[in-house]
Image (cartoon, helix red, strand yellow):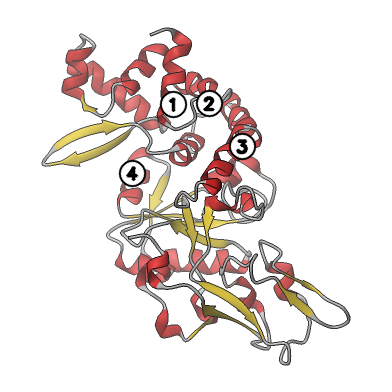
Amino acid sequence: MGLQDIYRELSKKLLMEHSAVLPRIWKTVCSEDEAAVVNALPATATELAARFCTTEDDMIATLGGLFHKGVVFEAVRDGVTTYRMPRHIVQFHDATILWKEAPQELMDLWMEFEETDYPMLLELVTQIKMPSFMRVIPIGEGITPRSRVLAHEDALSMLEAAQAIAVTDCACRTLHRKCNRPLEVCLQINRGAEYAIKRGTGRRIDVAEAARILELSRKAGLVHMTENTAGRSNVICNCCSCCCEMLRFATDEKTRGVLSPSRYQAHLDGETCTACGLCADICPVKALGSGDGDTVLLDADACIGCGLCASVCPVGAVALVEVRPPDFIPA
């Protein structure tokens, strides 16, 4: 397989066979020999050493370098470590951006990718109604009744149940730098936490510090997100609409399939509302806005159910109400 072919093959495995940018990203993070190793995954170091006619120690060193760069991932079962590729383009994006020694060339290429090839993928995801990569976690204080919130849609409950927690920089704000919102607020949990700690991209924290980060994020107008599954998650992101690779595409009808809303939707009590405008100012998807005179209008279809509006309303005129069943979140 030729030099360009190997990078094209790796791109194909991330469902981006026709991308003009992704092969260049692969070339930036992998030599041709390293790319051949990645293309042979999943496999153990012993299996790879035999295949590429090298020693196991040398292969472990190669895999360690790729792990550090965010190119390969480890899975340990019964004491045996198997190495694999990134599961999808989002995992590859986030992991390589948080590589501490990442060259500016890589950052520039990811910026180019997000403006050219990525939207086309998201349009396809939306068209074929593929499950969204991520979903919104509502801020619980605005939900009525609170007892209806499930454990996997409550950020604090997810943290309290986690076996390990780490915090990393937000990959999206690290890349784009379009705002001054807090950077070290991406919460990794369970396997995600252990991965970040081992790789050196995150630091271990306890539930109390993680809860403070959630509150800091809420006050900064950041949206809580996690993987779109009811199973055990590995991350709680805190996202802004100007940088986030999910949120900034969620307002476009063609690409909104990238992000699943929460099971809740904002409800505005017009009689209680004083039209102060705080909800409209903080809404990340502009679902709230000024109407004629002293009124606020709510576009319910645009609402992603994050609850930021309810969290800042001084008179309690905004609440989150359940509009989707529990099975809306995939098992």
In whole angstroms, how far apart are the C-alphas of marks 1 and 3? 17 Å
In whole angstroms, how far apart are the C-alphas of marks 2 and 4? 24 Å
Of the residues tagged 4 and 1, which is closer to the observer? 1
Q: Residue at x 42, y 38 (%)?
A: 88
Extreme residue in the bottom direction: 271
**Residue type of the residue flagged with mark 1:** Lys
Residue 145 left/right relative to 330: right
Residue with the mark numbered 3: 114
Is 33 above or below relative to 225? above
Of the residues tagged 1 and 3, which is closer to the observer? 1
In whole angstroms, how far apart are the C-alphas of marks 4 and 3? 25 Å
Q: Quadrant of residue 81?
A: top left
Q: Residue at x 61, y 71 (%)?
A: 308
The answer to which of 40 and 254 lies nearer the viewer is 254
Q: Which mark is residue 22?
A: 2
SS at badge 3: helix
**Residue type of the residue flagged with mark 2:** Leu
Of the residues tagged 2 and 4, which is closer to the observer? 2
